[in-house]
């Protein structure tokens, strides 16, 4: 079963760290999020 993430937005107070984020995590596939330190990957 695939996992779908659609239109996710996250903010800390006035600081928006994600805006309208969407992606699909296909079943049986390895997926990673890349970004600089402090960019909100674990959010």
Image (spheres, grey):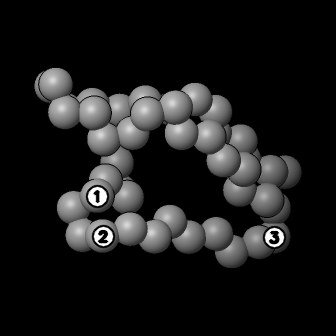
Q: Secondary structure at mark 2?
A: loop
Determine whether, in the image, residue 8 is placed left or right of residue 14: right
Q: Secondary structure at mark 3?
A: loop
Determine whether, in the image, residue 33 is placed left or right of residue 11: right
* Pointer 2 local density, CA inside 10 Å: few below 14, some 14–19, many at least 20: few
Q: What residue does disc 3 label?
A: 28
- Does residue 25 sit above or below 17 in this rendering? below
Q: What residue does disc 2 label?
A: 36
Q: Which residue is found at the position 34% from the left and 48% from the top?
A: 43
Q: Is there CB contact under 8 Å for labels 1 and 2?
A: yes
* Pointer 1 local density, CA inside 10 Å: few below 14, some 14–19, many at least 20: few
User: For residue 30, which quarter of the picture?
Assistant: bottom right
User: For residue 31, which quarter of the picture?
Assistant: bottom right
Q: CA distance from mark 1 to mark 3?
A: 27 Å
Q: How many marks?
A: 3
- Does residue 3 sit above or below 37 in this rendering? above
Of circles 3 and 2, the one toward us is 2
Q: Which residue is found at the position 80% from the left and 51% from the top?
A: 2
Determine whether, in the image, residue 22 is placed left or right of residue 1: left
In the rendering, which numbered label is found on residue 39? 1
Of circles 1 and 3, the one toward us is 1
Q: CA distance from mark 1 to mark 2?
A: 5 Å
Looking at marks 1 and 3 on the same chain, the residue that comes earlier in the sequence is marked by 3
Q: Secondary structure at mark 1?
A: loop
Q: CA distance from mark 3 to mark 2?
A: 26 Å
The location of residue 3, given as percent across then percent down, is 72, 47
Given the current orientation, which residue lies at the most extreme top position?
14
């Amino acid at each position: 079963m695939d996992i779908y993430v659609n239109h996710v937005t996250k903010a800390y107070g006035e600081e928006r760290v994600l805006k309208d984020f969407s992606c699909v995590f296909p079943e049986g596939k390895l997926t990673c999020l890349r970004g600089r330190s402090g960019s909100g990957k674990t959010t």
